[in-house]
Image: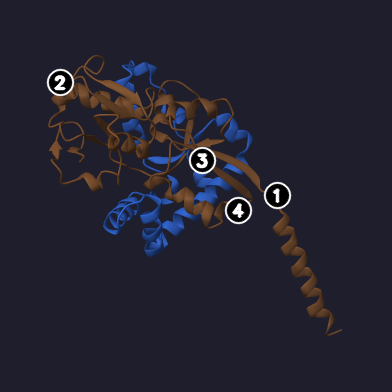
Chain colours: A blue, B brown
Amino acid sequence: MNGISGSPDYFTANRDLVLAVLRGMAGGARDVKERKPEMITFLKGYLEVPEDEAVKSYEFLVSHMPDNMIVDDAVIKSAMEFAASALKLKPDAVPDISKVRDWSYARAATK
Amino acid sequence: MKCCVPLTLFFLTTLLATAGFCQKLRPVTLGLTGKSLTTLIFEMSIRRGHFKQQGLDVRLITIRQSDVIIKATMAGELNFMSVIPTAILASVRGLPIRTIAVNVDNAPYVLVGRPQIKSMSDLKGKKIAVSSLGGMSTLVVREIDARSGLDPDRDVTYLAVGGSETRSGAMGAGFVDAALMTIPLNYALSGKDILVWPGARIMCAIQ
């Protein structure tokens, strides 16, 4: 999984900047999806892989890019459950998902 | 009068272009553990001017250990970070960290071993490269080890090496016996003594 995280206080205090970052990311994501030949050429040099691996990597990447930079809560919950289990946390010690993810910025940036 | 219109347009265009050119970009720092397939989106946002269009000068800061990135972000030394698994781990631990956007919703971890590692039990007494000792990648490897009958606290040594690219380099140089990797670094290794093991994906040998 890949994306953006940070301090909620910073996000609140810099809302406009956060939305600008997400809009910029959305532009990059659009290019990745729409410019396959260019991206494959770039990936060959960027990751130093041969053509066939660049193609496979590109296709994997595009098939796992969520719309609007938001994933289903089940994906986040799955990672939370794994973390809680590995940390041996009691169920009541695990925070609510609202303390882990906040899609309000992604929604505002992509509407 | 007719000649004034193009002249006015010329001055207006020049003025606007100059204002745009001189617009001060806001510096933004984004911490990550190194380049990977999933950082392609950030690279494109920078190289194709999407951040600049938003008035931003986004700088990708590579810090090999994901838990150091978490600390730097909490200390205000980084504005954003792209280490979601470790960020979620930090949130679950109760730290004030939120994930606000996801570029890629899946990146399968693959544990890769050197040729002499033919099974998980061969990892006893060996060194495994992870991103950082406090990061999610270590928890993943510990879980894999435990499910394979190894004692994660005694049977193996975890070395905090850094991101997938660095871990691959450590494997290639022989500094470690196994490493957790993500695609596409596993593609070159697939087909070489691949072993399927429970609880995760594949384990394969590096030449």
Disc marking residue B172: none
- Mark 2: few, some, or many residues within 10 Å (few <14, many ≥20)? few
Element at label 2: loop
- Mark 3: few, some, or many residues within 10 Å (few <14, many ≥20)? few
Q: Residue at x 50, y 49 (%)?
A: A25
Quadrant of residue B4 within the rendered picture: bottom right
Q: Residue at x 83, y 85 (%)?
A: B2
Q: Disc 4 marks which residue?
A: B52
Element at label 3: helix
- Residue A73 shows in this picture: no
Residue A9 drawn at (x, y percent)? 58, 29
Residue type for callout 4 = Lys
Disc marking residue B149: 2
Looking at the rendered structure, whether the residues under marks 1 and 4 are on a common chain is answered as: yes
Residue type for callout 1 = Lys
Chain of the residue on which disc 3 is drawn: A
Q: Residue at x 23, y 36 (%)?
A: B112
- CA separation in Å, label 1 and label 2: 57 Å
Q: Residue furthest right?
A: B1
Residue B60 drawn at (x, y percent)? 52, 42
Q: Disc 1 marks which residue?
A: B24
Q: Disc 3 marks which residue?
A: A104
Looking at the rendered structure, whether the residues under marks 3 and 2 are on a common chain is answered as: no
* Left or right side of A69 for B192: left
